[in-house]
Amino acid sequence: MSKKNKNQMVSGETLISNAPLKDADFENVKAAPAKVDNKKFDKNAKDKKPSAGARARKTFKEMFSELKKVSWPTAKKTASMFGIVVVVVLFFLVVISAFDYGIMSLVKLLMDHSVV
């Protein structure tokens, strides 16, 4: 029996990490046969385009499939986030209103003193 080098892959062994392998030997790894799409070689398949209804159904089916995978927040968390948004908006409303009032007062003061 020969010893297996820790950087050497054996045929049928799966790669566990996505990290790049340094000095890896891939001689024993066989590539999977490429799947051939028969539609590419069918001359009539190019001319056939699914109807608008079929494309719309496929789009909605895929959309609902993706929406099922979404991790939706709870009602309590949603209310909490909504409260935070309202507080931040009110804070900036006060800050911007204060700057606006200050600038308008400065412009009014300058206009009153500039007229002779």
Image (spheres, rainbow, N blue to C red):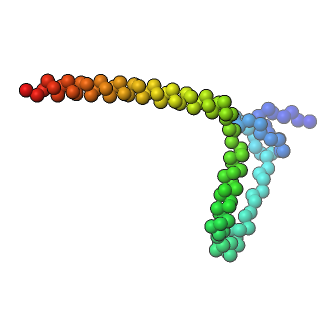
Instruction: Confirm whether residue 83 shows in the render.
Output: yes
Q: Residue at x 76, y 34 (%)?
A: 7
- In this picture, residue 42 sits left or right of residue 84: right
Q: Nearer the viewer, residue 34 or 44?
A: 44
Identified at 77% across, 36% down, the residue is 16
Residue 114 position (above or below residue 12): above
Q: Quadrant of the N terminus?
A: top right
Residue 25 sits in quarter: top right
Image quarter for residue 41?
A: bottom right
Q: Nearer the viewer, residue 63 or 78?
A: 78
- In the image, taking residue 75 as reference, residue 112 lies left or right, namely left
Where does the image place residue 75, in percent across and percent down from the top left? 67, 33
Above or below: residue 64 compared with residue 6? below
Residue 59 vs 71, above or below: the answer is below
Q: Residue furthest bottom?
A: 44
Q: In the visual, does 37 lie left or right of 109?
A: right
Q: Quadrant of the C terminus?
A: top left
| Viewer-closest of 20 and 77 | 77
Please say if 68 is above or below 56. above
Residue at 46 percent across and 28 percent down: it is 90
Residue 20 appears in the rendering: no
Residue 4: % across, % down: 84, 34
Residue drawn 72% across and 64% down? 37
Left or right, residue 18 beside residue 83: right
Image x and y of residue 93, in percent: 42, 29
- Total of numbered circles in the picture? 0
